[in-house]
Image (cartoon, rainbow, N blue to C red):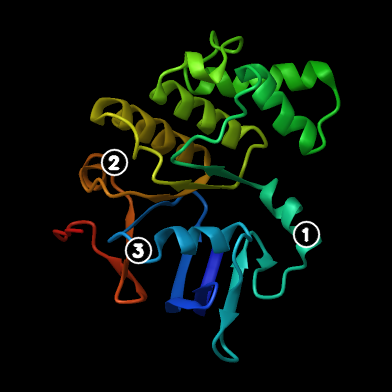
Amino acid sequence: MTLIDYRGIEIHQEDMYVLGDVTFTVGQGDFVYLIGKVGAGKSTLIKTLYGELDVICQGPESHAYVLGEDMSSIKRNRIPKLRRRLGVIFQDFQLLTDRNVHENLKFVLESTGWKDKRMISQRIMEVLSLVGMDTKGYKMPHELSGGEQQRICIARALLNDPELILADEPTGNLDPETGRQIIGILHKVRESGTAVVMITHNLQWLTEFPGRVMECRDRCLHEIDNNTNVSI
């Protein structure tokens, strides 16, 4: 099943041309690394996948679909529905600092239409258990380490059982061993069929946790062989 299908797409950030002729697909259960130098367009590309930035079709054969939604013509009022079907993990966590872990996750579920309190609590415990944080629900974000906060962010991304997870440099602020644990969790998530598209600058993950590799280079997107030596 194809979850992302881009063909011949152009991407701009404000008035700046970032990427052109972007063509790639992502299927169910794929684990895709997105690599490239700083400023090459990785985060910009990710933002188009959840409707933060627009895409431009370059010709009659061009198209851009994410979970069946046409991203070149999607109405703004349909973007929340799309986002309920995917999870986004940020480098800087973006947890709500005025409430504990349980309340952070409860806020997301209620915002996406969950109403049954028992089911909400049950789902929160399920995702916390998946990331090894089932005893941390009462903790405030500032009481957690960086690695623990990122585990909570993964739990948050999993709440609505997403078909696709987009992760923007999720290990960028973590030490190597904690980062390895985070990538391990994401790699395990894909076993259930959830696809993962992850930006990284740590090329060690490409050999430790194999997946497809896409590189933003020269204002284009290139798929490269994971057995090829790459440097960024």
Residue at screen point 43% across, 40% down = 91
Q: Position of residue 40 (x, y in %)?
A: 34, 66
Q: Is residue 40 above or below residue 19?
A: above
Q: Note whether 83 is above or below 187 in the view shown.
A: below
Of circles 3 and 2, the one toward us is: 3
Q: Secondary structure at mark 3?
A: loop
Give whichever of 102, 186 is nearer the camera. 102
Q: Residue at x 40, y 65 (%)?
A: 41
Q: Inspect this view and state whether residue 156 appears.
A: yes
Mark linked to residue 78: 1
- The disc, 1 or 2, on the residue closer to the chain's N-terminal end is 1
Residue identified by numbered label 3? 39
Q: CA distance from mark 1 to mark 2?
A: 34 Å
Quadrant where the image shows the C terminus? bottom left
Q: CA distance from mark 3 to mark 2?
A: 25 Å
Question: Element type at marker 1?
Answer: helix
Give how far across and how far down residue 152 sits, in percent.
52, 26
Q: Locate the N terminus by quadrant.
A: bottom right
Q: Which residue is mark 2?
A: 209
Name the mark nearer the viewer: 1 or 2.
1
Residue 85 appears left or right of 196:
right
- Residue at 57% from the left image edge and 15% from the top image edge: 140
- Residue 156 is situated, as x and y percent measured from the top left of the image, at 59, 32
Q: Mark 2: which amino acid? A: Phe
Work out whether residue 152 or residue 29 is closer to the camera in this orientation and state it. 152
Residue 1 seen by the camera: no
